[in-house]
Amino acid sequence: MANQYADSFVVKVQKRFGKPAGELLVELSIKKMSYNEAAKYLGYKVTTIRKYCHRYNVVLNPSVDRIEVEAALCPMFYSKEINKFNILSRKWRHK
């Protein structure tokens, strides 16, 4: 992982790929890369990629990880039995 305080993202991308950061991010967008894939490819954290995408008005595909996790939690959340995923969404009855 690159350090945010060392050389700038723009300088590192220019040295490594020989093109400006804005152009590279546009190419990644055309390749339909997600923010996570771009972060792995470039060697930076997702937050850094998002920051520079916002700066250059480039939109990458959303990361799929969060959607898959939420889809996996749905059956457990709607289960009739109380578990750690649905305990705070149940009404409590006094006996």
Image (spheres, grey):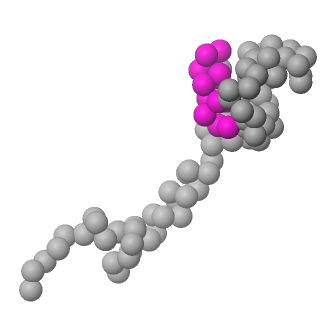
Q: Which quarter of the rendering shows the N terminus?
A: top right
Q: Position of residue 14 (x, y in %)?
A: 84, 17
> Is any atom of residue 41 visible in this view?
yes
Is residue 5 left or right of 18 when viewed as pictured? left
Is residue 71 left or right of 78 when viewed as pictured? right
Quadrant location of residue 76?
A: bottom left
Specify the farthest residue to the front: 6
Query: Between residues 43 and 81, which one lies in front from this camera angle?
Result: 43
> Is any atom of residue 26 visible in this view?
no
Q: Which quarter of the rendering shows the C terminus?
A: bottom left
What residue is at 33 percent from the left and 78 percent from the top? 82
What residue is at 72 percent from the left and 33 percent from the top? 3
The secondary structure that most of the magenta stretch takes on is: helix
Q: Position of residue 66 (x, y in %)?
A: 56, 50
What residue is at 58 percent from the left and 56 percent from the top? 68
Which region shows up in magenta? 45-57
Q: Is residue 3 above or below residue 52?
A: below
Is residue 78 left or right of 43 when viewed as pictured? left
Q: Position of residue 73 (x, y in %)?
A: 48, 64
Q: Position of residue 17 (x, y in %)?
A: 89, 22
Query: Between residues 45 and 65, which one lies in front from this camera angle?
Result: 45
Q: Is residue 16 above or below residue 94?
A: above
Is residue 94 rendered magenta in the image? no
Is residue 48 rendered magenta in the image? yes
Numbered marks: total: 0
Specify the farthest residue to the left: 95
What residue is at 75 percent from the left and 34 percent from the top? 2
Quadrant location of residue 37?
A: top right
